[in-house]
Image (tube, grey):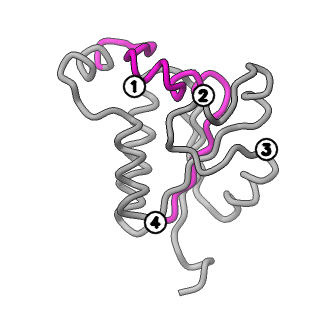
Amino acid sequence: MNQEQVPSLAIILLSEDLEKLHAGSLVGSVASMSGMRVNFFVTMNALKAFLKDSVDNNDFKTGDVGKELLAKKIPLFNDLLQEGKDIGELGVYGCAMAMDVMGWKKEDMIDVFDDIIGVTAFLGMAQNAQVITM
């Protein structure tokens, strides 16, 4: 099967809301495990949730559902992304511009990123893909 025939999904995470991060990661993880090629672009405020300190301290912006996810110790977005990477074809990329603005390095982030890239590179990956923004 050539690359054009493999259904692909591009998910842009830009919100720091735990519910949006979780929903986007769940959709992407299930899609990758179902045979789709999935690429995530983590940008703007969503990057804050990927900091090691945020994950270690469960320091997330939450609504009612997010509070319950944390209280019930449900595996979070980072676990869903890792599961998608382990089972399917899933890539996670941080936004170089937003990280540069905040002074963050790849080492400051949880170990789920494949690379830190610019928008142009991500648009190349997203060509012919269905795009979801959360």
Who comes first in sequence, dot 4 or dot 2? 4
Give the residue at mark 2: 108
Q: Position of residue 34 (x, y in %)?
A: 35, 65
Label placed on residue 36? 4
Q: Which residue lies furthest to the bottom in this view?
A: 1
Earlier-in-chain disc, 3 versus 1: 1
Alpha-carbon span between mark 1 and mark 2: 22 Å
Q: Choose between 94 and 26: the one closer to the eye.
A: 94
Q: Which residue shows up at 56% across the image and 31% down it?
A: 109
Location of the C terminus (image quadrant): top right
- Measure the alpha-carbon separation of dots 4 and 1: 23 Å
Mark 1, Cα crowd under 10 Å, few <14 / some 14-19 / many 20+, is many
- Judged by depth in the image, the label closer to the viewer, 4 or 3, is 3
Q: Which mark is residue 118?
A: 3
Secondary element under disc 3, as helix, strand or loop, is: loop
Q: Which mark is residue 19?
A: 1
| Residue for point 39% across, 35% down | 77
Question: For the point 42% across and 41% down, which residue is it?
Answer: 25
As measured in the structure, the alpha-carbon distance from the residue carrying label 4 to the one carrying label 2 is 29 Å
Q: How far apart are marks 4 and 3 (CA)?
A: 23 Å
SS class, disc 4: loop
The reply, left or right, for residue 11 in relation to residue 100 is: left
Q: Earlier in the sequence, mark 1 or mark 2?
A: 1
Please name the residue shown 69% across and 31% down the image: 105
In the picture provided, is 104 more to the left or to the right than 113?
Answer: right
User: CA gap, disc 3 to disc 1?
Assistant: 25 Å
Which tag, 3 or 2, sits closer to the chain's start? 2
Query: Of helix, strand and loop, which one carries label 1?
Result: helix
